[in-house]
Image (tube, helix red, strand yellow):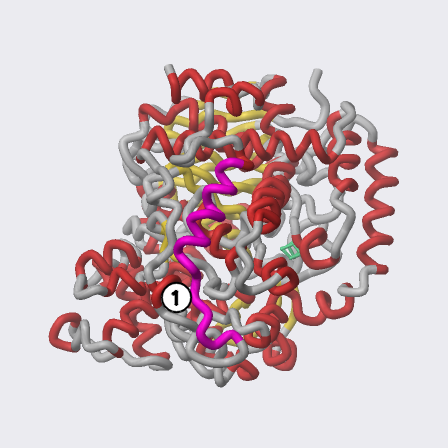
């Protein structure tokens, strides 16, 4: 018997068939859980999947073995599928209580295929799964779906829901978890359009309700490791700042180190940064909320008109400085509306910023799109969010994302369409940060900081250096950070408070009753990275030409400040990319070699890639 793992359910929404099984040992110990399981399971179905919003797509909802064990931060769930935005493997991790409830209901993963004939939701409750038809949820937004279902299932459940943007299959539609419960952190699986995948399946929500206990091999050892973690957390010199500001303090930092995306990544500092800073959030916050099993809550909630919004650094950057919005109340309202309709705040901010720059440069006018648009125009931002979510007017085109939008506008606008492989770049200007640039270029879902937040290393090691150390650092981070999403645990304890990562290997060993050291787990994470890369090569022929950044990064120097004049150097960047491939054991085109795959026990992947 395997300790620490729950069941997997395969649900075919077209036929209504549900199969439940135990995970096998290879899945458990080679891929750990969460994102690792998702990558492995989607790889197995890769040939069947027509496109992101086709019923053949496979949506994997997977939490990890540390979730709901009582271990601190054990709350994370990954939503993964072929992304409608990139047509590559996509995933997004979410906190709140969803993974906690799913594990307590006895399930570690749901594999969802097909399409329901009517708007429906899944009920995952204490060992059973039911597909419930709910036509009354049609056209409801995420918050309303949550309220309706919570009325039925009570407070003691967690609800993952989509809004109108998901229903309309906006390429970057998000999934909301835990709306409206003050004590619970309202969170989103925002990136890569997982809300659109749910929408394409006519799946408005998943309700998870569990009252069981997760079986742990050595509870005494886990308690001891947890106690040590609590001691480390409380003695961290970052503890007080984190408790006060959470991720929002990154805004002041990014502005100071001149990496804050401003006016569609034209500038790196924002004149009104103080108005939307971590301090500004702290000064006006109503309360702070937490995910399950968390003692360092970071859900900072502020007022947004009649409603409230949970703000994070990425939202402040992409909907604030990047759009020129000058006040916290304006950013909070844009944030709230994105959540309400179910849109990713990063992609939405990038798409609107791109439009604003097109207006600035005279590439678009009111005659083209039906409205005026200028930097800092909050009222139009609110209207655009609605237009995008409902796919109305010019919003229909904006709903496709910045890459498609630039193809429509043309006139050289591709240069400042800030995306990699179709996924909009998150909130760090990287012209004076080669390691961060490499992180974005090589991220397996398109440009996203959560795989490798290497900009702190650039600040420490040199803003214009392209040494081998930078490639090594990025690879380390690309294995370390996603490992948390495999374990089902929040990475912020390690990232922000500097917790010893070895503690996570000890906790995993205690849960599953087998001995693992951190290096073993990092090897699993490397295995997963190679699976997602192999999928990109197989599906889209992804190679060195695609691991590339927007032309702005190489052509437009930073216009002011101490980093004035710096831009990415193309030749140095290509050499850094080559070093990265070499260190990874990939060939010059960026394809994992057969030997590398076999050394990672990925014979099935090697077979598919090389025959
Ligand atoms: S630190 Fe924040 S994101 Fe992480 S578990 Fe706690 S509340 Fe959730």
Which quadrant of the structure image shows residue 263?
bottom left
Whether label 1 lies within 8 Å of ligand 1 gets the answer: no
Judge from the rendering whether residue 62 lies leftward or rightward of residue 566; answer left or right: right
Residue at left 61%, top 34%? 105
Q: Quadrant of the N terminus?
A: top right
Judge from the rendering whether residue 249 lies leftward or rightward of residue 588; answer left or right: right
Residues shaded magenta: 563-582
Q: In which quarter of the image is the C terminus?
A: top left
Judge from the rendering whether residue 236 lies leftward or rightward of residue 565; answer left or right: right
Q: Where is residue 439 in the image (x, y as percent from the top left)?
A: 50, 50
Q: Position of residue 351 (x, y in %)?
A: 32, 63
Q: Where is residue 427 in the image (x, y as percent from the top left)?
A: 48, 64
Judge from the rendering whether residue 56 lies leftward or rightward of residue 493; answer left or right: left
Residue situated in front as seen by the camera: 52 or 129: 52
- Residue that carries the numbered disc 1 in the rendered image: 349
Q: What element carries label 1?
A: helix
Q: Is residue 477 magenta?
A: no
Q: In this view, does 179 lie above or below 537?
A: below
Ligand 1 visible in quadrant: bottom right
Q: Is residue 576 magenta?
A: yes
Residue 112 visible in image: no
């Amino acid at each position: 018997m395997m300790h620490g793992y729950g069941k997997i359910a395969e649900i075919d929404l077209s036929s209504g068939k549900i199969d439940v099984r135990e995970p096998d040992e290879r899945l458990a110990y080679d891929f750990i859980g969460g994102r690792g399981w998702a990558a492995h399971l989607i790889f197995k179905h890769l040939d069947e999947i027509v496109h992101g919003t086709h019923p053949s797509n496979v949506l994997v909802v997977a939490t990890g073995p540390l979730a709901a064990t009582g271990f601190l931060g054990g709350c994370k769930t990954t939503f993964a599928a072929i992304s409608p935005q990139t047509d590559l493997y996509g995933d997004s991790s979410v906190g709140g209580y969803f993974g906690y409830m799913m594990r307590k209901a006895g399930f570690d993963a749901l594999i969802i295929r097909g399409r329901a004939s009517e708007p429906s939701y899944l009920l995952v409750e204490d060992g059973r799964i039911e597909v419930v038809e709910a036509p009354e949820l049609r056209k409801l937004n995420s918050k309303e779906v949550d309220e309706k279902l919570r009325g039925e299932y009570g407070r003691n459940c967690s609800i993952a829901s989509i809004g109108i943007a998901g229903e309309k299959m906006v390429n970057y539609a998000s999934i909301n978890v835990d709306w409206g419960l003050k004590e619970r952190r309202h969170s989103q699986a925002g990136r890569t359009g997982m809300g659109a995948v749910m929408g394409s399946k006519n799946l408005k929500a998943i309700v998870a309700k569990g009252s069981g206990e997760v079986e742990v091999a050595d509870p005494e050892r886990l308690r001891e490791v947890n106690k040590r973690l609590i001691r480390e957390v409380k003695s961290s010199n970052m503890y007080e700042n984190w408790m006060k500001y959470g991720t929002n303090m990154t805004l002041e930092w990014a502005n100071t180190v001149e990496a804050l995306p401003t006016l569609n990544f034209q500038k790196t500092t924002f004149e009104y940064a103080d108005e939307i800073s971590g301090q500004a959030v702290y000064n006006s916050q109503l309360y702070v909320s937490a995910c399950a099993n968390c003692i360092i809550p970071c859900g900072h909630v502020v007022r947004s008109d009649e409603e409230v919004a949970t703000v994070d650094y990425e939202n402040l950057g992409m909907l604030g400085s990047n759009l020129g919005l000058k006040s916290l109340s304006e950013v909070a309202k844009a944030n709230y509306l994105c959540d309400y309709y179910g849109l990713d705040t990063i992609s939405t901010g990038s798409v609107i910023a791109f439009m604003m720059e097109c207006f600035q440069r005279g590439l678009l006018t009111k005659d083209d799109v039906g409205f005026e648009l200028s930097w800092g125009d909050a009222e139009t931002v609110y209207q655009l969010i609605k237009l995008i979510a409902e796919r109305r007017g010019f919003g229909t085109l904006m709903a496709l994302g910045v890459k498609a939008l630039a193809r429509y506008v043309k006139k050289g606008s591709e240069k400042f369409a800030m995306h990699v492989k179709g996924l909009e770049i998150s909130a760090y200007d990287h012209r004076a940060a080669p390691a961060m640039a490499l992180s974005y270029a090589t991220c397996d879902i398109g440009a996203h900081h959560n795989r490798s937040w290497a900009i702190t290393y650039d600040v420490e090691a040199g803003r214009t250096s392209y040494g081998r150390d930078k490639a090594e650092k990025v690879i380390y981070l690309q294995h370390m950070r996603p490992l948390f999403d495999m374990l089902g645990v929040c990475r912020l304890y390690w990232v922000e408070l500097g917790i010893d990562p070895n503690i996570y290997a000890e906790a995993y060993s205690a849960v599953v009753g087998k001995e693992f050291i951190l290096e073993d787990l990092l090897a699993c994470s490397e295995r997963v990275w190679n699976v997602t890369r192999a999928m990109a090569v197989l599906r889209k022929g992804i190679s060195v030409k695609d691991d590339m950044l927007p032309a702005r990064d190489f052509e437009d120097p930073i216009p002011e400040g101490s980093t004035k004049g710096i831009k990415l150097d193309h030749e140095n960047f290509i050499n850094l990319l080559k070093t990265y491939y070499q260190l990874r054991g990939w060939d010059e085109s960026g394809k994992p070699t057969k030997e590398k795959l076999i050394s990672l026990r990925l014979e099935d992947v090697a077979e598919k890639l090389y025959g």
